[in-house]
Amino acid sequence: MKYDWTNVELKDNHLVLKQRGFSRDDLSAYRNVSIAGIQSRTLDMVPGTYRTVFRLDGAKGGACSGFFWYHDDKAEIDIEIVTPGDSMVNGTINYTLHPSLAPDGSPIANATLSVPLDDSHLRPDTFHEYRFDYHAQRGVQYYLDGALVHTNARDIATLSGNLQFKLWADGNKWWSGTPSTADVLMNIKSIDAYFNSSGTDTDTAWMRACSAAGGPSSLTICTIQ
């Protein structure tokens, strides 16, 4: 698979990520799946509440849409939707705190909650709010449309990280499955992040960038509501 910046655009007041349709000919020719991803420039995000509203459109096969807080593969919080397809976890929403596997490769208890989309009454093609709250003492609490669905207080990271969104498929039968033959669109309606920072000059840098953009005011992207 290959990230392509042209798969990210603003359309109808939404931020849209695209996974391009992958044909049988593409598969036979071992071509890369064209996928999308974005991440915050801020790398010093620590405990806070992270929320987004999005929907998935167009999947005809495998795609994985992910909403992450990320430091590295051993310090990661994510909510991922795997569309219906041929993978081992197709048609599920997954709430994971990494590491999710022990050194011997066995699953760590409670590290991942995988819920069939039918059981969660979730239609990915309609807008829903996905949220996780990250707290050093209370652990990570995952919410769907404001309702608490899972809590994990094990191995809570104390490191700083950033926020990421990804839409991808790589043919892995254990996760994304065979890529969708049609374009898949992740239409993001909103992203809200309220967090502490490990940086010492964040406020100064933020104000400098905000002032350069013409703010603070209701017309600038740096306004926090």
Image: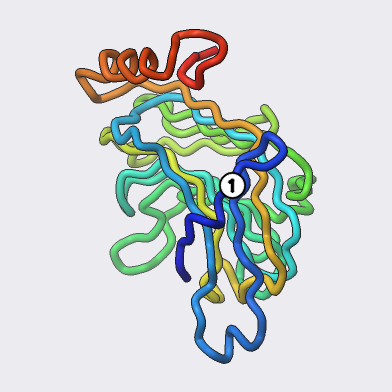
Q: Is residue 5 above or below residue 126?
A: below
Which of the two residues, 221 or 141, is positioned nearer the viewer here? 221
Rendering coords of residue 108 (x, y %): 41, 56
Q: Quick check: 206 left or right of 130? A: left
Question: Which residue is drawn at the image coordinates 53% and 67% (left, top)?
Answer: 34
Taking the image as shown, residue 59 lies to the left or right of residue 201, namely right
The residue identified by callout 1 is 9
Q: How many marks?
A: 1
**x, y percent for residue 131:** 57, 33
* Residue 45 position by quadrant: top left
Q: Residue furthest bottom?
A: 28
The residue depicted at 63 percent of the width and 88 percent of the height is: 25
Q: Position of residue 184 (x, y in %)?
A: 68, 60
Vertical relation: 79 (above or below) 131: below
Please give the name of the residue rendered at 70% of the width and 70% of the height, measured from the top-left corner: 61
- Out of 13 and 172, give the one closest to the viewer: 13
Q: Secondary structure at mark 1?
A: strand
Could you tell me residue 124's position as x and y percent? 73, 49
Residue 192: tell me if it is visible: yes
Give the camera-side residue of 12 and 70.
12
Q: How is the image coloured?
A: rainbow
Q: Residue furthest left?
A: 200
| Residue type, label 1 | Glu
> Residue at 74% across / 39% down in the picture?
127
Is 149 left, or right, of 156 in this rendering? right
213 above or below 149?
above
Is residue 175 visible in the rendered structure shown here?
no
Q: Where does the C terminus fall, quadrant-wise?
A: top right
Q: Dot 1: within a 10 Å radius of its alpha carbon, few (fewer than 14), some, or many (20 or more) residues? A: few
- Along the horizontal axis of the image, is 122 left or right of 37? right
